[in-house]
Each structure stands twice: as C-alpha cells, then as structure tokens.
Amino acid sequence: MSEEQPTDGEQVSADRGRLSRRRMLGLTGTGAAVGAATFAGGLGIGRATAAEPAAPPTGTSRTYPFYDAHQAGIVTPAQDRLHFAAFDVTTTSREELVTLLQAWSLAAAEMTQGRPAQAEETSYDSPAADTGEADGLPASGLTLTFGFGPSLFRDAQGKDRFGIADRQPKELKRLPHFPSDNLNPVRSDGDLCVQACADDPQVAVHAIRNLSRIAFGTAEIRWSQLGFGRTSSTSKAQTTPRNLFGFKDGTANLKAEDTKDVDTHVWVGGQDDPAAAWMTGGSFLVTRRINMHIETWDRTSLREQENIIGRDRPHGAPLSGGTEFSEPNFTATGRAKEPLIAMDSHVRLAHPTTNKGAAMLRRGYNFTDGNDALGRLDAGLFFLAYVRRPSTQYIPMQMRMSREDTMMEYVQHTGSALFAVPPGAKQGGYIGQNLFT
Ligand SMILES: C=CC1=C(C)c2cc3[nH]c(cc4nc(cc5[nH]c(cc1n2)c(C)c5CCC(=O)O)C(CCC(=O)O)=C4C)c(C)c3C=C
Ligand SMILES: [Fe+2]
C-alpha cells in the first residue's frame, strides 16, 4: 500500500497522530474518508491543508527511530541539510527544565516519524499544535540530536543552576581560546542545543521552529546555523561530498560500519567519568563556525591548494599517490627530497598518526549567510565533530592546526561551542533522564 493511502476504516480523528504528514494531506485533500467539515470541529491541521494542493515532496520517506540506545544524528548517515540551534534556558526551575526535555522528546519522536510536532490537537481557538509548514512533506530522514552545554550546570559565577552541578562531566568545559580565533560571543556557547538534520531543508527548519515554540517561556534560541550541504560521510555507502574549497571532505572520517573505532573514539564508556555515568552511550559535540575566505582561495593556484590540503582536488587522493581511500604515506618524498605531503598540510596535521591516535566523527555542513559590505561571501564550514574525550581528541589537534596549518590563512573561526550529548531516550522516557533522576 502506498504511503498516501489510508487503511480502510482508519479513524482519522482518533489516530491523527499516527498518520504521516503526507498521508494526512492525502486524506484531507481528497476527503475520501472524512469530509473537511469533520475537521472544522477541532482539527486545525485539516483546516490548514484541505484547500491547498500537495506540495511536491523534495525529501525522502526514510525515517530513523528516536528512541534508541544512542541518539540518531551521530553515526546515522549524514543528511544533506542542517538547522542547528543553541538555546539559553530562561527559567530557574528544575521542574520546568525537565518538563521542557520531556515535551521536546515527545515532539522529536513524532516529527522524526513524519508526524506533526504534537500528537494532541488543540482547540480551534488556540494556536495549532503544529506550525504546518511541513504538512505534506515526508519524514525526510529527520534526526534530532540534543545536547547540554557547560552553562546548563553552572552559571558564570559557578553557581549550581538546577541541582546538577555535581554531575557535570569533567570533559564538559568551555573550549579554550585557540590562536587566531575571532569568536563572536553571540554565535557561541549555549545551555542546550538541537541538531536537526534532514534530506529536506524545510523539514529541518520546521523541527527547530516547533521545538523553539514548545520552549517558549523556558528557553530561547541564542544562535542558530543553517547548513546546505554535508561535508562528510558517516557511512561507507555514501559518496564523499565536497566543501566550499572544492575538495572532497569526509574521506578519512570515522564510518558507522567501523563499530570498534566508533566505540573507541565516539561513545562515552561506563568507566570514563563515574560522576557523570549518565553520559554512558553519549558523546561530546564540538561546533565551530569556520568562515572560509573563498575569494582569496579562488585566486590561489591549484598546486598551492592541493599542497595546503595534502590531497588532490579531482579525486581526493593523498599527494603521496593512490586513490581516494589509499592511506597517506607521510614519509614519501619527491625529487628534491621534500615530503610529497607537506609538513604544514591539513591532512598531515589532522591524521591520527600525528595526533597520538586521536580520531573524530566529523558531521559538518557548508553554509552561506549572505555577504559583507565589500561583496565577499559570508561562507564557510559549520564544523561539527563527535568525540568521546574533547581534551585528547579535539583540543590538542585544534591547537596544533591553529599554529601550523597553512589552511589557517584562508579560514577564520567565528563561533564555538561544546555540548554533552546524552545517550538516546528510552521509549516513554526523555532525553537526559538519567541526569535528572
Ligand atoms: C580540529 C579539527 C578539524 C578542523 C577544525 C577542520 C577544518 C577543516 N577541514 C577542512 C577540509 C578537510 N579536512 C580533511 C580531513 C580532516 N580534517 C580533520 C579535522 C579538522 N578539520 C580530520 C581529523 C581529518 C582527517 C584526517 C585523516 O585522518 O586523514 C580533508 C581531507 C579529506 C578527509 O579525509 O575528510 C579536507 C579536504 C576544511 C575546509 C576545514 C575548515 C574550513
Ligand atoms: Fe579538516
């Protein structure tokens, strides 16, 4: 049976929350099972969509379960679109914070399955339970991944905000200042974060909008970032995309299929931090808004660009030879005995063999946020990386890159944050439950 076709006798009013947004549109559009008049009594969404033609679906019908051991949106295949939001919690009440996390979890469980944000409809005289712009769109592989910033645990004076300070993971601290950082505080940090990834940008934006609406009075958006193209692969089944420098990005990323590596480098283990045992099965998320000086890059020779990256542009193969997935040979030298992969190239400085074995799961996105007064694009890479231990996997690597990587001449870090991403919620439970119970 196609997704649009309701089961015979399916009760639309009673089962409304169990129908995909697309199926609902089919029902309301044709009036096959229930006339539009039925909706006028109290189902706002029926009113909103009954007279409108179906929007052409741009997404896909794939779905990822929300209730799982790990949160979706980490090792699940990176989708092409992102809407990321960091929130400031405005309440001082622990109870209200928990209520928000419960409501967010319920809404996320609905939306990731292609349903409206809230299963229960409101009265005709109240704002509708869902904002409506994803009506008619399939789930589009939506994943919603939630995290907690250091400032959720302690305020700027070190005061315990919600009675959870003694459970703050020792790894969850504001990232240090790195040389040549030019961070905008308005684009940095946050108490909570939500990473919404989908195959359709409207589905990702709809999710953040509805979660923000649900948070009204408890938390508000501090900063947000749209991403229009993935810059990594998290599965061997995916092709490697390109970043705005035109290079393949994500070739040597950790991949979901390498479960041993993922266990070693991504998931927090039960013994990692006994005071923060609630993080077992979770991960830490580093976010960096990295502006790329596109115009300068575009005036640089291809030879120079390839030397900066350490790989060739057409295939993404290491400059020591081979194909995209060949291991780089950092000892190989050319005719003048100079290393084929430059000492200050990005891949040499990022490779596990030059970082005491450190690796990370990258999940970043290209972004363009308009242009400056000189007509230069405000564009770059919204870097997202999941690590088990930021202090050994991200911080030393970034410190070294900031000092030695030639690519730093072409980029500027303008936003930064670190979040603790708890494990997945249990069916009937909520995100971060073990932190609060
Ligand atoms: C500190 C971590 C990293 C930052 C910040 C970062 C920024 C950044 N990277 C590119 C482009 C490429 N990166 C590539 C590989 C790569 N990058 C990092 C880490 C950071 N990158 C790692 C760990 C690796 C893998 C290294 C390895 O194991 O070989 C590549 C090569 C292709 C690939 O393997 O993905 C490119 C290209 C940009 C443009 C950028 C900031 C704007
Ligand atoms: Fe990189």
Image: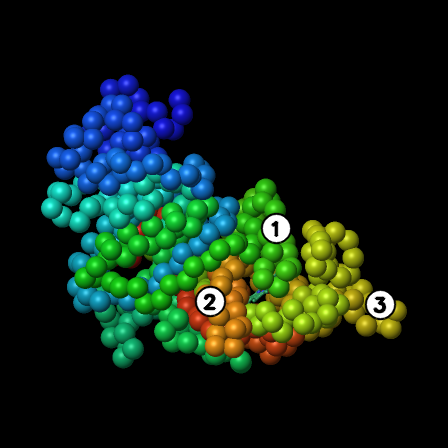
Rendered image: mark on residue 370? 2
Dot 1: element: loop
Q: Residue at x 53, y 66 (%)?
A: 380
Q: Ligand 1 near label 1 (Cβ, under 8 Å)?
A: yes
Callout 1 amino acid: Thr
Q: Is mark 2 within 8 Å of ligand 1?
A: no
Q: Which sits in the foreground, 87 or 29?
A: 29
Alpha carbon separation for disc pair 3 and 2: 42 Å
Where is residue 436? Give x, y as percent.
25, 57
For residue 389, say whether it is visible: no
Residue 108: % across, % down: 31, 47
Question: Could you tell whether 41 is left or right of 72 in the image?
Answer: left
Q: Amino acid at mark 3?
A: Gly
Mark 2 residue type = Gly
Quadrant of the rendering where the C terminus is positioned? bottom left
Side of 387 where 27 appears, left or right:
left
Residue indicated by mark 1: 240
Q: Splitting the image into 4 quarters, where does residue 141 fall?
A: top left
Residue 157 in the image: above or below residue 231 = below
**Quadrant where the N terminus is found in the figure:** top left
Task: Name the residue located 39 percent from the left edge and 71 percent from the top edge.
Answer: 187
Farthest-out residue, top? 8
Residue identified by numbered label 3: 334
Question: Of tags 1 and 3, which is closer to the observer?
Answer: 1
Q: Residues within 10 Å of mark 1 (few under 14, many from 20)?
A: many
